Amino acid sequence: MSQELTSLLELLDLERIEQDIFRGSSRAAIVPRVFGGQVAAQALVAACRTVPAGRLPHSLHAYFLRSGDPGAPIVYTVDRIRDGRSFTTRRVVAVQHGQPIFHLSASFQVHEEGMEHQEPMPHAPDPETLPAAEEIVPRYRELFADPQVPERLLRARAAVDLRYVEEPPFGRVGRPGEPRSQVWFRTNGKLDGELDDPMLHICLATYVSDMTLLDSVLLAHGRGGWAVGDVVGASLDHAMWFHRPFRADEWLLYDQESPTAQGGRGLGKGRIFTRDGRLVVSVIQEGVVRVPRQEGGSQPASPAAASR
């Protein structure tokens, strides 16, 4: 297991400070705020630790309320909304500096047999044929607004082997195209022994789900993204549905598209498939996506200032 993955697992191993209150720390992100996928994954971990055994998450719905401070701890308070015969519901509020920064509702279900159907998996090349991030990012070094961004980008994603099927947004600046994107991903290391927990696989997929979902919005307009500096933005809300079992340490295809963007907001839809074609997760996210003020927008150019 890579040291980076070990660090991520430690990040998700929240400290329990009361029965339903947990505390987590943060790690460096590409922009000077807490990465949204980290807060979502930690909040889901907190909810999971209050649920009866044998129940796994089947959905979550979340709102990003304020930008998180990466230098301060985050406190997660869990409300036990309902424990039914088949379903359990939890609500989690993440607080920093006395203010809520994130709100999540999650539903859990006992295993149950039922009707089955799914959309077919779209075509994608094998992940082994695609370049890793360490090969891709340095190619576009001259495009980044800050020369330290490539190192920050690689460090922020080092726990995950994430491979773009086509060029990432920062490789297609100025070339608007189809609002679609695909990436393969898996953790940089196997989850063995006590780490081989279905809930942990789900929480890790939640962490990764926020990394690239709005890429398809950027691709439609030929924008490179927050690292390039030609947009500012932040996640607004995030919803996930977990359909079937999967492993986060085996290749997963994240197929993403954007059906609409308007009013300074963009919508991303994603489907996650296992390598053998099973649809395991559906994701929808809306985010603030704005043109910097110097190009005619109405907000500051700093990514940290993309207030909601």
Image (cartoon, helix red, strand yellow):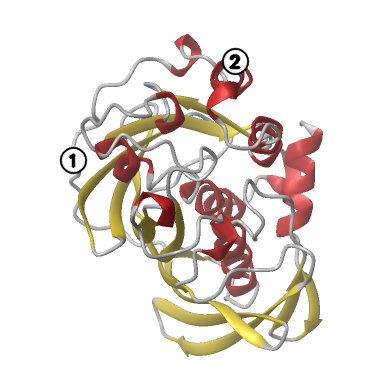
Q: Which dot, 1 or 2, sits closer to the camera?
A: 2
Comparing 113 with 163, the one in front is: 163
Name which residue type carries label 1: Glu
Residue 119's label in the rendered image is 1
Q: Secondary structure at mark 2?
A: helix
Residue 122 locus on image (x, y percent)? 23, 28
* Residue depicted at 52% across the width and 14% down the height: 131
Type of amino acid under label 2: Glu
**Between 66 and 164, which is closer to the camera in this rendering?**
66
| Residue 271 image offset from top left, x and y in percent | 31, 44
Image quadrant holding the C terminus, namely bottom left
Q: Position of residue 24 (x, y in %)?
A: 75, 68
Residue at left offset 24%, top offset 65%: 263
Q: Is residue 119 left or right of residue 50?
A: left
Q: How many marks?
A: 2
Q: How packed is label 1: few (under 14 Cα within 10 Å), some, or many (20 or more)? A: few
Q: Which mark is residue 50?
A: none
Residue 107 visible in image = no
- The local secondary structure at tag 1 comes to loop
Q: CA distance from mark 1 to mark 2?
A: 33 Å
Q: Is residue 105 above or below residue 19?
A: above
Circle nearer the N terminus (1, 2): 1
Left or right: 133, with 116 as reference point: right
Q: Is residue 2 left or right of residue 190?
A: right
Q: Quadrant of residue 68?
A: bottom right
Q: Quadrant of the N terminus?
A: top right
In the image, what residue occupies the spot 55% across and 19% down?
136
Residue marked by disc 2: 135
Viewer-nearest residue: 28 or 188: 28
